[in-house]
Amino acid sequence: MTRPLGLYLANLDLEAQHALGVAKKIRSQMAALEAALGPVQLAYPSGGRVLLDGEIILDIGESLSARRRTSLYGYYERIGRDGAPWDYVYLRYGRTSAFVLRMLARLKRANPRLRVFIELPSFPYSTEAVGFRDRMFTLTDRFFRNFLRHNTDRIVTFSHKEIILGVPTIQTDNGVDVVALEVTPQPPTVNAIRLLGLANLSFWHGYDRVIAGLAAYRAAGGSRPVVFDVVGTGRELARLQHDASRLGLEDVVRFHGSRVGAELDSIVAGCHIGVSSIGMHRLVVDTSNLKSREFCARGLPFVIAYPDRDFPPAFPWAFHAPEDDSPLDIGALLDFHAGLAPGFQSGMRAYAEENLTWTAKMAPVVAEIRTLTRA
């Protein structure tokens, strides 16, 4: 039987520094699809260019105006202009517009056998919009997304919804490149217990809850030194820095800025507990957090504060905080860490290798592609 040819569409500059994490995820997903099904081409914009499998198929310059035009409509207008030789398209969702709809319609007209899969990780997602420009795009999206169902075969979701926007879903979760993440021995606990926050800082990460928890722990006479290492930049950085200063915690809340490579690995290796997103309730979304999975693959126990299929309450290596804005209970967190059974890191790693790889997470997608393309 002929192996299907796929196209992965991502309207995101995968060469940009801020997109390195997303680019890694996309290439891991592609590797899983290729291993199971066959070749997958990749199309994405870079500056004012559009690349398909590394070949420049559109180039309107490198000015700011050119980059914006490419991202807004040039990318979608160029894809499918020469036909649609693929058996399926996997589209990383970036909100809907008239240009997205026209692209999908053109692809389907060119190849009626083409199957379209759209990855929509969180839904509803309107609460993620921050800033005037973001909210304007969201309003546009709310109108045009109602027409997605006409040329979309399945929506890939990390939520529990069976139908989204009138389209049947494939339910799965985020995965990680487990092999690329190393397990480092837990550092000694004779000094401070170090908590790790690692993110492009946004309000839904809930790191303000950690800072408030540290203040409450200190006010209650907590005797064990606890340090919070915050790695990353973003909209929430100034607020978090203000909170730490206001509460007199500059000595125990450390802001490292953006770190990659050996610098990042060194910070992670010095920490005892990771802090996943503990403010997801502020978004009112049903999604799957990547950071929890990375912590698990690294053998780093972590804090979680939202329902997750991969980390139910019985999962022994995650501390479940309340889904609200209350300060993180530092004392209870320390008791959780002290109660971990010896050898827990190997258990976490084994769990990640079996359950959290992109091969495992893309399996439901692969099965549906095979069914719909008769591959």
Image (spheres, rainbow, N blue to C red):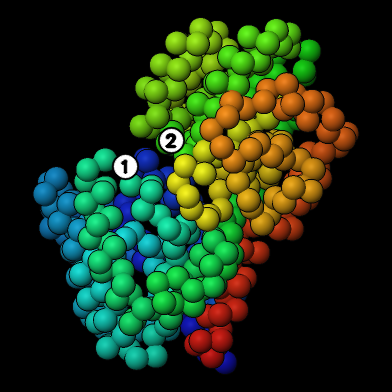
**Amino acid under disc 2:** Phe
Identified at 38% across, 62% down, the residue is 93
Identified at 63% across, 51% down, the residue is 307
Q: Is residue 201 visible?
A: yes
> Helix, strand, or loop for circle 1?
loop
Q: Which mark is residue 203?
A: 2
- Kindly identify which residue carries mark 1: 130
Identified at 34% across, 81% down, the residue is 151
Residue in the foreground of this view, choosing between 58 and 166: 166
**Amino acid under disc 1:** Val
Question: Where in the figure is residue 258, as x and y percent of width and height?
Answer: 44, 29
> Helix, strand, or loop for circle 2?
helix
Real-space CA distance between mark 2 and mark 1, rounded to the nearest whole angstrom: 10 Å
Identified at 15% across, 56% down, the residue is 69
Image side of residue 300 versus residue 167, left or right: right
| Mark 2 surroundings within 10 Å by alpha-carbon count, few (fewer than 14), some (14 through 19), many (20 or more) | many
